[in-house]
Amino acid sequence: MRSLINSEILGDYAIQNGKTILTQKLDMEKTKKQPGVYEVIRVIDGVPLFLEKHVERFKRSADLLGYSLKTSSGSEYLNSSIHSLVELNSCKNGNIKIIINNLNTAMQDNYFFFLKSSYPSLSQITDGVPTILFSAKRSNPNAKSLNLPFREKVDEEILKTSSYEALLVDKNRYITEGSKSNVFFVKDKTLYTPPAYNVLPGITRGAIIEICQRLSIEVIEQNIHSSTLKDFDGLFITGTSPKVLPISSVDGMIFFSSKNTLIITIKDAYDMLINEYIQSRT
């Protein structure tokens, strides 16, 4: 696959409102129209991971913004469009971005395209990644909505500090989530994560909580103040691209998260869950 008109897009073909188009004919300005919701789904061996959960979140995000998705945006349409995109581009591995916007009109638009994605390197998985604290809170954290100004500001700071991710802190200095991930903290044999009402309910986040329940690992949802970071043994982020990724530092504070036994156990269990999901659909 080759990059075309936009640094965000990969592949020769995209799908717009059910029609196949050449990627260079995709008007990216139209995809940015609001109100809109989006999802990024990882495809491995031609299988869109946890598609059902993504469809649920699509609907929930639209509901939280006060809109309803058209029936044509249901799971069957999303599933068939994703598989068509995989076949059109002869690519069975990558991230696909789905945007549904113009939610306030009868003619809602939808777009599917392969997204240029950055997966953690082997060294980042082995050693962990550096992060920073960034003062911000999304206005509607439970909804995965388009917010380009916010994204641009965060990306600029991440680039400037040579970090992998920014952990958002609210006005009271509580850590809520990553700019495009969820975050977990480890102390002894217990896992902590910010409350669901205060963050985007990530698909990977939910899977990690379910895994911990099966492994009898206690998970406590509570607000984590930035001043208490020093009290934790390690922390990690979760998301579509990073999966379970240890954090090596926060604003220069060093953590040996990649060596933490509990984090290693959770990471291995999540990788196993992905393999089981793929095998059950191939």
Image (cartoon, grey):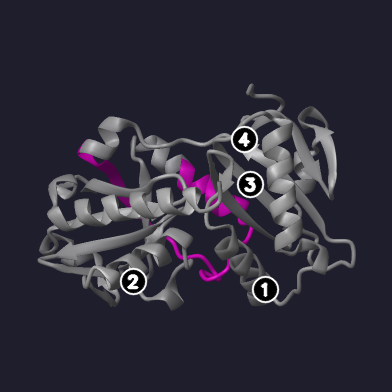
Front-most of residues 47 and 185: 47
Question: Going by the image, does 25 lie left or right of 34?
Answer: right
Q: Which residues are magenta?
A: 127-155
- The three-letter code of the residue at mark 1 reads Leu
Give the Cα separation between the discs numbered 2 and 1.
Answer: 22 Å
Q: Nearer the viewer, mark 1 or mark 3?
A: 3
Identified at 75% across, 32% down, the residue is 13
Give the Cα separation between the discs numbered 4 and 2.
Answer: 30 Å
Discs 3, 4 touching: Cβ within 8 Å: yes
Question: Tag 2's secondary structure?
Answer: loop
Question: Tag 4's secondary structure?
Answer: loop
Question: Does label 4 or label 2 sit earlier along the sequence?
Answer: 4
Q: Is residue 87 magenta?
A: no
Identified at 89% across, 62% down, the residue is 107
Q: Nearer the viewer, mark 3 or mark 4?
A: 3
Give the Cα separation between the discs numbered 3 and 4.
Answer: 10 Å
Q: Position of residue 3 (x, y in %)?
A: 64, 24
Discs 1, 3 touching: Cβ within 8 Å: no
Q: Residues within 10 Å of mark 2 (few under 14, many from 20)?
A: many
Q: Position of residue 217 (x, y in %)?
A: 21, 70
Q: Which mark is residue 157?
A: none
Q: Which residue carries the number 1 mark?
A: 65
Discs 4, 1 touching: Cβ within 8 Å: no
Q: Which residue carries the number 2 mark?
A: 194
Identified at 17% across, 67% down, the residue is 228
Q: Which mark is residue 97?
A: 3
- The three-letter code of the residue at mark 4 reads Glu
Q: Which mark is residue 8?
A: 4
In which quarter of the view is residue 152 placed? top right
Question: Does label 3 or label 4 sit earlier along the sequence?
Answer: 4
Q: Is residue 144 visible?
A: no
Question: Does label 2 or label 1 sit earlier along the sequence?
Answer: 1
